Amino acid sequence: MTSTAATTEATARWSEELRTHGRRVTKQRLAVLTAVEHHPHAVVDDVAAAVRGDLPDISLQSVYVVLADLTETGLLRKIEPPHSPARYETRVDDNHHHAICTGCGRIEDVDCAVGHAPCLTPENTHGMTIQIADVLYRGLCADCADQAS
Ligand SMILES: [Zn+2]
Ligand SMILES: [Zn+2]
Ligand SMILES: [Zn+2]
């Protein structure tokens, strides 16, 4: 597949998703969705840099607004690791978790062993209906472990 065909395919797919979620198809939304799809777990600055390949004049503020809107509609998932800027991804349809390296901040997907949320059942819910258990694995990636030894 040529890259042009891949781009056309992605544009058609994301246009359909936007309509399904009751959102107008705009250049900005398509560019942000495509950028996040190609750079999973990207921070806002990385998304903006990628989007500017298509839309050189888009402001950082506009990228923030589009990201927030797409997160709200459920097309993007926002990950907020502690002490680290928010990241975005298009993999929204499963209950996967993340492993973050405390050395370099690299972040990887970890499939949920259970597959649905919440995947941990609390002993006592205090009367709350529990919807999700946020699981974040933290450790050292192989590169950082090598450097440390
Ligand atoms: Zn690392
Ligand atoms: Zn992920
Ligand atoms: Zn899980």
Image (cartoon, rainbow, N blue to C red):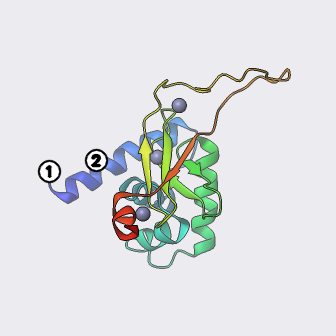
Q: Please state the horizontal and vertical placement of residue 31, each as a whole percent of the image.
A: 44, 61
Q: Is mark 2 on a helix, strand or loop?
A: helix
What residue would you read off at disc 2?
A: 9
Position of 16 with respect to 76 (left or right) is left
Please provide percent x and percent y for residue 63. 57, 66
- Give, as a three-letter code, the residue at label 2: Glu
- Label 1–label 2 contact, CB within 8 A: yes
Q: Residue drawn at (40%, 56%), measured in percent from left and top? A: 34
- Figure label count: 2
Label 1 neighbour load within 10 Å: few <14, some 14-19, many 20+: few
Query: What label sits on residue 1 in the rendered view?
Result: 1
Q: Distance between the residues labelled 1 and 2?
A: 10 Å
- Mark 1, mark 2: which one is toward the viewer? 1
128 or 120: which is nearer to us?
Answer: 120
Q: What is the residue that sits farthest to the front in this orientation?
A: 149
Determine whether the residue tagged by mark 1 lies in a helix, strand or loop. Answer: loop
Q: Identify the residue at image location x=40%, y=53%.
A: 37
Residue at the spot 60% in from the left edge and 48% down from the top edge:
71
Say which amino acid is labelled 1: Met
